[in-house]
Amino acid sequence: MSDVLPLGPDELLTTTRSVRKRLDLDRPVPVEVVRDSLEVALQAPSGSNQQGWHWIVLTDPEKRRAVGEYYRKAFTAYRSSSLYPTTRSSGDADRDATQHRVADSAQYLADRMGDVPVLVIGALTAKAELPASNQAGMWGSLLPAAWSLQLALRARGLGSAWTTLHLQYEKEISELLGIPDDVRQGVLLPVAYYTGDTFKPAKRQPLDTVLHVDGW
């Protein structure tokens, strides 16, 4: 078993951050550490206990570079769109400054995704054509496990970042990796050891701005 940091549950939950610029691109990541973290992730809930998830762990440099290039292309298109967060102001100078820092780190990751030592794709057995209606029940059988994986990696001194832009090229990536048609990708996690000491909780909007008790 890999070494686990002495983090209490609240500290683990509040300091598991999206790591981009602080990913150590030069330090190898043993596959055994990823396996240990996935063993933890498999304890997550899934609908009707189906456990229909799949985990594609990429260590091969050529495949990582290929997936990284698809991600870079998708990010470039996203950055040029009206949906990109820095194209509009929130009216809050501090929040806008934070968004610009996030955008800068996101660009950094997009330029280097293929250099990250390990890429993990979380996927789910599903119909080839996803339903047009609400898909929350389906993805609820994968996403809790992916978050558990991020927590388990953090507890072992590794960083990750939740990304989905690669899904613009899901078909091409599935063909590259031999993923069957009835297995749909849900998340791409770049995984590496991180530089620096540790992480701290991020600034968030006050709870009372989003809390609704007994109704809206």
Image: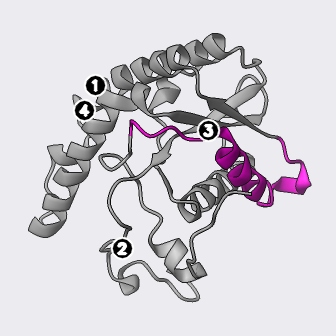
Q: Which label is found at residue 186? A: 3
Residue ID at (65%, 46%): 34
Image quadrant of residue 72?
top left
Instruction: Indicate which disc residue 76 carries.
Output: 1
Nearest to N terminus: mark 1 or mark 2: 1
Residues in magenta, as a range:
25-52
Is the residue under label 3 in contact with that under label 1 (CB below 8 Å)?
no
Q: Residues within 10 Å of mark 3 (few under 14, many from 20)?
A: some
Q: Residue at x 32, y 60 (%)?
A: 196
Residue 77 seen in the figure: yes
Coordinates of residue 128 in the picture (x, y in percent): 75, 22
The tag earlier along the polypeptide, 3 or 2, is 3
Residue type beneath disc 4: Arg
Q: Which mark is residue 79?
A: 4
Cα–Cα span, label 3 and label 2? 27 Å
Residue for point 25% across, 51% down: 102
Mark-to-mark CA distance, 2 and 4: 28 Å
Q: Which marked residue is nearer to the observer: mark 3 or mark 2?
A: 2
Residues under numbered marks 4 and 1 in contact, where contact means CB atoms less than 8 Å apart: yes
Query: Can see residue 92?
Result: no
Tags 2 and 4 in contact by the CB under 8 Å rule?
no
Secondary structure beneath dot 4 equals: helix
SS for dot 3: strand
The residue at which mark 2 appears reads as 200
